Image (cartoon, helix red, strand yellow):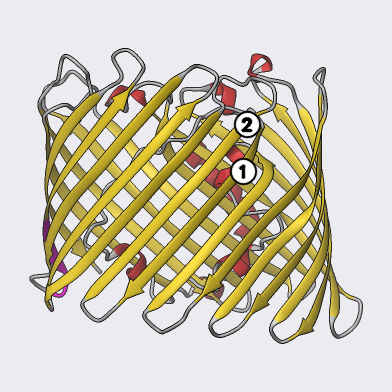
Amino acid sequence: MPAYNRLARATMIALVVVPGSAWAGDFAYSVFGSVEHSDNIALSTENPQSTNVFVPGVNFAYRQFGSTLQANVVGTVEYLDYSNKNFDSQLLGTLSAQANWSVIPQRLDFTIEDDAGVQPVDTLASNAPDNQQQTNVLSLGPVLHFQFNEATRGQAELKYLNSYASKVDDFDSSRGLGAFRVIRDVNPTTQVSLNVEAQRVDLKNNDAGPDYTRNEFYAHYVHTLRDFDVDASLGWAYIDFTHEPSASKPMANVTLGWRPSVDNSFSLTGRYEYSDAAQDMLLQPGQTIVDSMTNVPTNPLDLISDPTRGGINTGTMVVDSQVYLDQSVEGTYSYRGDRLSITVQPLYRKLSYLNDTTFNQKEKSGAVSVEYKLQPTYFLTAFANYQHLDYTNIDRTDKTSRFGLTLSHDFTQRWSWRVAYTRQIRNSTAVQQSYHENEFLVSLVYHR
């Protein structure tokens, strides 16, 4: 069953008995039509193909934070039609959906999370239109809450998870997750918890790797002040593979945030933990759906009215079911002024696969974006991304740069246009994997 049909069916089953009044939230959408010209649509080394791509699409967002239902949904659907007909037209979509239904207030919840995106079929090949696929990860199940005393409470969870890729069945899996948590509010700004999780992973393709059981025990500490916050998880993880050696290591996931002023903010996240592609697409261990929505803008239009938004980017994830050790450090600096906004994001990441080490990699990357309000309705945006990726076991290095400029204009309350230029360059030590591309884009957007 296709991923979107599974999500719709699960959502209907879970929420069909929720009173209609519980759905009274905020909904926003934008409809766009774009014409894109690329001088190397297949990102080829020696045989660039020039083509036009006609892209109608829609962005949508839904936000609800009521007593019975809390929900946060953001998505994009677009249709791509290639003028040179060397590639088939395709319908692509992304979806980030989180919902929490309070079946019995403060006692029993039912949670749903779904993440759909577009990822490469072959990560080692260039990102041509025929090297794209839909992926989807769905998680749903009940959460039982109980109170020990005024400051201490318990939480028991039982979830079913399903991962699916449209072209690579190595990603497909069914999972069962059980968790038990003891949470204590130390004071109004500090919370600690002890967490035990057990997850069973069964792969759909027997050749994709071994099935396994993943057990984790960790402490979670959250400290939130006006200008500074800490979110830290420390513990131990054990993975028991079927017919493969087991693996066991300490785990740590720490995020520090600092807001020295209203306009400036810093964050730093470090990870040392086991993960896999499907796990990376969902919430971090111990995070609840309600927690994940506390910093989301109340108006869903804020999520889709960004003048640079309007298309779907293909990810860079290796789409399989292999488990890896993630050792990474990621920083973010943001400045938000009346006219000028700046974001800087450096990243270092090392992935060490436990069974098939083909994709062992080290990544050093950085991203910068700058938006300047020329006039109240005119916006100029520039961005630059750089990635240095070493595949350590196949002796391959890719150096990829991508930069561009966008001008947009809100010429009425509902209508806007934008023009954009993007250039991307890859230098690779692999044969026939270097390329360069120039892309021009014109879009008309209606939003409400």
Q: Which residue is drawn at 72% across and 65% down?
A: 109
Q: In which quarter of the image is residue 338?
A: bottom left
Q: What element carries label 1?
A: strand
Per the image, the residue denoted by label 2 is 352
Per the image, the residue denoted by label 1 is 327
The quadrant of the image that shows the C terminus is bottom left
The x, y position of residue 388, in whole percent, is 39, 36
Q: Residues within 10 Å of mark 2 (few under 14, many from 20)?
A: some
The x, y position of residue 240, in whole percent, is 83, 30
* For marks 2 and 1 on the same chain, the one whose residue lies earlier in the sequence: 1
Q: What stretch is highlighted in magenta?
A: 413-418
Image check: 319 left or right of 87?
right
The x, y position of residue 398, in whole percent, is 37, 28
Image check: 253 left or right of 340?
right
Q: Is residue 415 magenta?
A: yes
Q: Which residue is drawn at 43% across and 32% down?
A: 389
